[in-house]
Image: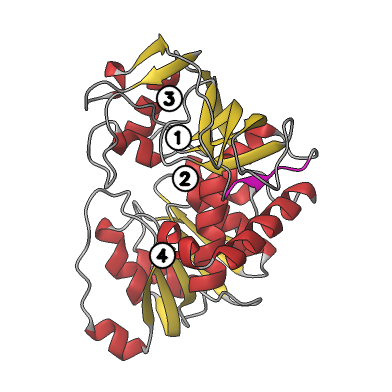
């Protein structure tokens, strides 16, 4: 079978496509014939050795996938050959067949396309956990999404609307904000020319926002926090800007607000039943067509390095899909 391999840490151009032996399932594993791989910003980090996980060489990037189960390992229950599933591998999905633990796989209804399923495991899983479990977002509240045109950001925009919030989408260009508008954002803020704090307060009649979803960090974190309301919740999701900001803690005192970290990967290990219910809800919204991640582009394994370069160049709006 074919796989895209990282044999040394470096840029996407160092990745190579090679034939490797087909996997066999160990106890508790299944083999998934991979139909679609969803790429994420973390894939650009892991191939450079800049992600917290550093796989043994050689490895395939690609953290989320969707496909069909073709074999079951010993002890696997609750799944069958031919079943449609999606899941998170952390890395290793950019190949035609994947051996992975059955535990944690998500059942994909027939009504949900594989590209859609692969585009949302991480983005919707992270964002729904952030808004529901950490942000406690309520109908009628205001939600500001920083980095709203990226994968997790667009998921947060869509989920915010489904959950009944007024959504303020914040991004770095009018072109990126246009797709946020298509996804239902109520207010658009281009934080390159605009003062983010003032824009958030203006959008809320001077009250400030109830929940901030921040996947960007950098220079935008403090002004976003200053644009928060009393008793607000500031969700730390990621640092796409490239560096971790320092926050004056007096702001939390003045606003009686919370800064809450969002680490979905560890949280779901301790809350498996709640996470499974979250997965079922997300898939049901997909079936009802309430969620649909825009697809930036679909690539082959051979073209996947070019797709990762588009992440590097901040050209991606929506989700990048690879068909092994």
Question: Disc 1 or disc 4, which is closer to the eye?
Answer: 4
Residue sitting at x 33%, y 76%:
226
Distance in Å between CA atoms under marks 1 and 3: 9 Å
- Residue 98: % across, % down: 52, 28
SS category of the residue bearing label 2: loop
SS category of the residue bearing label 4: loop
Question: Disc 1 or disc 3, which is closer to the eye?
Answer: 3
Asked if residue 172 shows in the view, the reply is yes
Q: In the rendered picture of this protein, how many numbered marks are placed on residues?
A: 4
Closer to the N terminus: mark 1 or mark 4?
4
Residue sitting at x 50%, y 45%:
151
Q: Are marks 1 and 3 in contact (CB under 8 Å)?
A: no
Numbered tag placed on residue 234 in the rendering: none
Q: Mark 4 highlights which residue?
A: 262
Count neighbours of disc 4 (C-alpha within 10 A) and say few if under 14, some if 14 to 19, many if 20 or more.
many
Closer to the N terminus: mark 3 or mark 2?
2
SS category of the residue bearing label 1: loop
Asked if residue 322 shows in the view, the reply is no
| Magenta extent | 104-109
- Residue 171: % across, % down: 43, 51
In the displayed structure image, the side of residue 18 where residue 120 appears, left or right: right
Q: Is residue 52 above or below residue 310?
A: below
Question: Disc 4 or disc 2, which is closer to the eye?
Answer: 4
Q: Mark 2 highlights which residue?
A: 150
Q: Mark 3 highlights which residue?
A: 307
Question: Quick one: 276 or 70, which is closer to the camera?
Answer: 70
């Amino acid at each position: 079978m074919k796989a895209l391999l990282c044999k040394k840490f470096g840029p996407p151009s160092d990745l190579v496509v090679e034939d490797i032996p087909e996997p066999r399932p160990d106890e508790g594993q299944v083999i998934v014939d991979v139909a679609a791989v969803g790429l994420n910003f973390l894939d650009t980090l892991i191939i450079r050795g800049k992600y917290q996980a550093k796989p043994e060489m050689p490895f395939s990037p690609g953290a989320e996938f969707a496909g069909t189960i073709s074999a079951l390992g010993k002890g696997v229950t609750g799944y069958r050959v031919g079943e449609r599933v999606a899941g998170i591998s952390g890395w290793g999905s950019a190949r035609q067949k994947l051996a992975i633990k059955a535990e944690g796989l998500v059942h994909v209804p027939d009504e949900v396309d594989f590209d859609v399923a692969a585009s949302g495991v991480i983005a919707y899983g992270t964002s729904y956990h952030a808004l529901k479990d950490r942000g406690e977002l309520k109908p009628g509240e205001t939600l500001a999404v920083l980095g709203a045109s990226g994968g997790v950001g667009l998921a947060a925009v869509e989920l915010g609307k489904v959950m009944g919030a007024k959504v303020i989408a914040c991004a770095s260009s009018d072109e990126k904000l246009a797709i946020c508008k298509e996804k239902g954002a109520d207010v658009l803020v281009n934080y390159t020319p605009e003062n983010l704090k003032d824009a958030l307060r203006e959008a809320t009649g001077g009250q400030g926002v109830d929940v901030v979803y921040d996947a960007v960090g950098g220079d935008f974190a403090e002004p976003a926090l200053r644009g928060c309301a009393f008793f607000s919740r500031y969700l730390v999701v990621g640092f796409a800007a490239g560096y971790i900001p320092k926050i004056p803690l007096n702001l939390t005192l003045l606003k009686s607000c919370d800064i809450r970290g969002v680490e979905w990967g560890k949280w779901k290990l301790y809350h498996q039943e709640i996470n499974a219910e979250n997965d079922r809800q997300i898939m049901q919204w997909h079936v009802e067509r309430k969620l649909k991640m825009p697809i930036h582009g679909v690539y082959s394994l051979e073209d996947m390095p070019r797709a990762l370069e588009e992440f590097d160049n901040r050209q991606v709006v929506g989700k990048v899909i690879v068909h092994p």
